[in-house]
Image (cartoon, grey):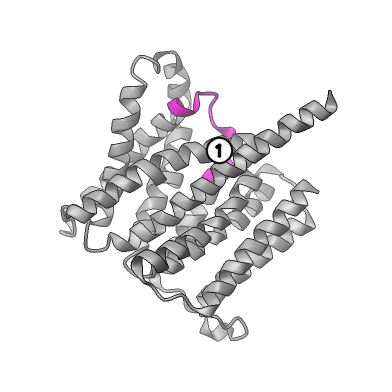
Amino acid sequence: MTAYFRRIGRFFDDRAVVLLVLTAAMWGANGVVSRAAVGQISPMTMVTLRWLIVCAVLLPMLRGRVGPYIPTLRKRWRFIVLMAFSGYTGFNVLFYLAGYWTSAVNITLLQGSIPPLVLVGAALFKNTPITRLQIAGMIVSFLGVGLIATRGDLLNLGALAFNRGDIMLLAACVLYAGYTIALRERPHLPPLVFFAGMALAAFLASLPFLAAEMAMGQTYWPTAKGFWLVAFVGICPSLISQLFFMRAVELIGPGRAGIFTNLTPLFGAFFAITLLGEPFHLYHAAALALGLAGIGLAESAKRG
């Protein structure tokens, strides 16, 4: 009987890994889109339209099924709004603005800061124990971020020079790390109902940002390419990947799930080089290797 339950546990773990790898691939592509969207669609228009697409797909699917859960949604509406703002609206506002000041390679590689931020946050706010190997993995991951900031020269800290886009991206990563940690506390709702509530909250939260962009005269309607880009992010990174990620967190927890976002740079760098033709330097390769090493250390600690 014990062996049977172990096999069941391994099955769920393996399924979570598949979901997280697919999620990382879609997030890596999203980093490339944020750079490709420059000049094709204004940032706040992108944020608003992507969540409008999600709502347009989800809400009709849930027609007549939400009624039993309305009391729970009303009771936890503050939590849902905060989660939507941190993990969806706030993250994406900073994410797409960052594309105007930094490269797609940097955008994807800097997302490697999310896993160590999740580990630190889980330890500080959820009393989640951290092993020595997980700490080592976190340090290794931060070294990769440092390589990008110093353009490959960690010994020369005077060369530390995050540009505006890098800083925005790191702030976005802090928001998403908080979202990841809080997922364990989500209301007891079917995943689609919970996600639909957050998508609607994210759409409504994006409207003030769009209004501000319009007031500054910086809004412009998407080009034909811009429409394809927003359609992609609305379906894949915004809808499918978020459902995959929530399910994976349920299966293996936020700490282990967060570690797998270190795969995002691997996919993102590949897409940035092959699709956008961006240069890939030796320090980018070193940062990528450090990020993957961080996954190996943290995962070996958990499985041990």
Q: Is residue 209 visible?
A: no
Pick the front one: 181 or 250: 250
Residue at 22% x, 59% y is 40
Which quadrant holds the N terminus? top right
Compared with 192, 172 (above or below) is below
Q: What is the x, y in percent for residue 266?
A: 52, 61
Q: Residues within 10 Å of mark 1 (few under 14, many from 20)?
A: some
Pick the front one: 65 or 87: 65
In this picture, which residue range is highlighted in magenta? Answer: 179-193
Residue at 67% x, 67% y is 140
Q: Which residue is mark 1?
A: 183
Q: How many marks?
A: 1
Q: Answer with the quarter of the image where residue 99 lies.
A: bottom left
Q: Answer with the quarter of the image where residue 275 lies.
A: bottom left
Q: Is residue 298 left or right of residue 21?
A: right
Q: Which residue is the extreme one toward the front?
A: 274
Q: Is residue 59 left or right of residue 23?
A: left
Q: What is the x, y in percent for residue 162?
A: 46, 74
Q: Could you tell me the amino acid type at mark 1?
A: Leu
Compared with 61, 211 (above or below) is below
User: Overall secondary structure of the magenta stretch?
Assistant: helix
Q: Is residue 212 left or right of residue 78?
A: left
Task: Indicate the secondary structure of the residue bearing disc 1.
Answer: helix
Q: Which residue is the extreme one toward the right?
A: 2
Residue at 39% x, 30% y is 196
Q: What is the x, y in percent for residue 20?
A: 56, 45
Residue 147 within the segment the image draws in magenta: no
Q: Is residue 301 visible?
A: yes
Q: What is the x, y in percent for residue 103?
A: 39, 70
Residue 188 within the segment the image draws in magenta: yes
Compared with 279, 105 (above or below) is above
